[in-house]
């Protein structure tokens, strides 16, 4: 098998199984572990996989700006949002950060909902302008244009004075062993603070984000109370359910 063929096979296995172990690939492909490690290093340099100790993980969706992501998998995101509505009740204090799936959720909220919503996302605050029974508290900071959220020390200091019944976290990447992660350390710090001030945490995740990692860890995945995703393999679902997370797919 040529190197290019072998690396393509690795990518196909990774796409199907979400993670690979070098020793296992060595046996399956009939080459040495050193060869597999070199393959994984090359694939990592090309931006096709994320190397970890003993193997590699899927990279998941590429980093794209907010306006581009709005039109990706919109039907799937709406379905996730409709499932999440079951956990939102009148008189709750909701904390909602950025993300296109979170924006779809806000757009699906009934106009009769009575709630207080805290957000650091200008698009979400604007989407709530027609909800007369929702008090919107906008958290300031420096606008991170890629995700369209306010971040920084001012954001964290404001969050220190607040409590929420439910935090609806925009999830960039999640792995059951490594946790929830994002590309920006500042965004990781703000999300971590949001987790700490909330009684429960809910995340809506499209399947291409499962078992993927980014550069900065927000928190372990078991900090989630609810994980709402698409139909996934029972084994993958079990990895999260075994951590005490309520998984809906």
Image (cartoon, grey):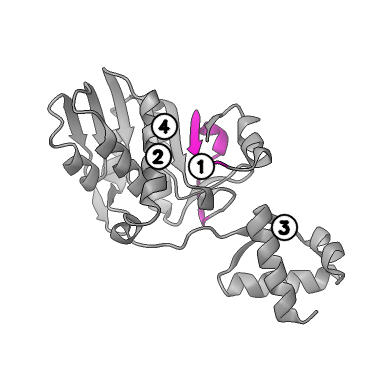
In this rendering, would 22 be left or right of 83? right
Where residue 69 appears, as percent x and y from the top left, is: 35, 57
Where residue 199 appears, as percent x and y from the top left, is: 42, 23
Where residue 76 appears, as percent x and y from the top left, is: 42, 46
* Circle 2 residues within 10 Å: few <14, some 14–19, many ≥20: some
Label located before the other in sequence (4 or 3): 3
Identify the element where label 3 is drawn.
Answer: strand
In this rendering, would 192 be left or right of 99? right
**Could you tell me how far apart the alpha carbons at marks 3 and 1 are, in whole angstroms?**
22 Å
In this rendering, would 40 be left or right of 157? right
The residue under the point 66% across, 75% down is 42
| Residue 143 vs residue 66, the one in the foreground | 66
- Say which of marks 4 and 3 sits in front: 4
Where residue 49 appears, as percent x and y from the top left, is: 61, 65
Name the residue carrying label 2: 79
Does any portion of residue 99 appear in the rendered image?
Answer: no
Quadrant of res 163? top left
Q: Which residues are magenta?
A: 214-231
Name the residue carrying label 4: 83
């Amino acid at each position: 098998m040529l190197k290019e063929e072998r690396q393509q096979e690795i990518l196909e296995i990774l796409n199907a199984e979400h993670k690979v172990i070098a020793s296992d690939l060595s046996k399956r492909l009939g080459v040495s572990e050193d060869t597999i490690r070199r393959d994984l290093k090359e694939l990592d340099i090309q931006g096709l996989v994320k190397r970890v100790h003993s193997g590699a993980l899927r990279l998941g969706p590429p980093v794209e700006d907010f306006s581009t992501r709005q039109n990706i998998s919109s039907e799937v995101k709406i379905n996730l949002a409709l499932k999440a509505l079951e956990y939102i009740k009148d008189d709750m204090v909701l904390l909602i950060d950025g993300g296109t799936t979170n924006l779809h959720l806000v757009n699906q909220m009934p106009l009769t909902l009575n709630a207080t919503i805290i957000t650091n996302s200008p698009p979400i605050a604007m989407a709530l302008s027609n909800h007369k029974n929702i008090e919107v508290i906008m958290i300031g900071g420096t606008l991170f244009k890629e995700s369209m959220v306010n971040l920084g020390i001012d954001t964290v200091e404001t969050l220190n004075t607040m409590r929420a019944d439910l935090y609806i976290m925009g999830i960039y990447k999640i792995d059951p062993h490594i946790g929830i992660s994002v590309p920006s350390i500042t965004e990781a710090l703000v999300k971590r603070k949001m987790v700490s001030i909330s009684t429960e945490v809910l995340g809506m995740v499209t399947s291409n984000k499962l078992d993927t990692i980014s550069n900065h860890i927000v928190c372990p995945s078991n900090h989630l109370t609810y994980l709402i995703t698409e139909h996934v393999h029972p084994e993958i679902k079990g990895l999260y359910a075994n951590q005490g997370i309520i998984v809906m797919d």
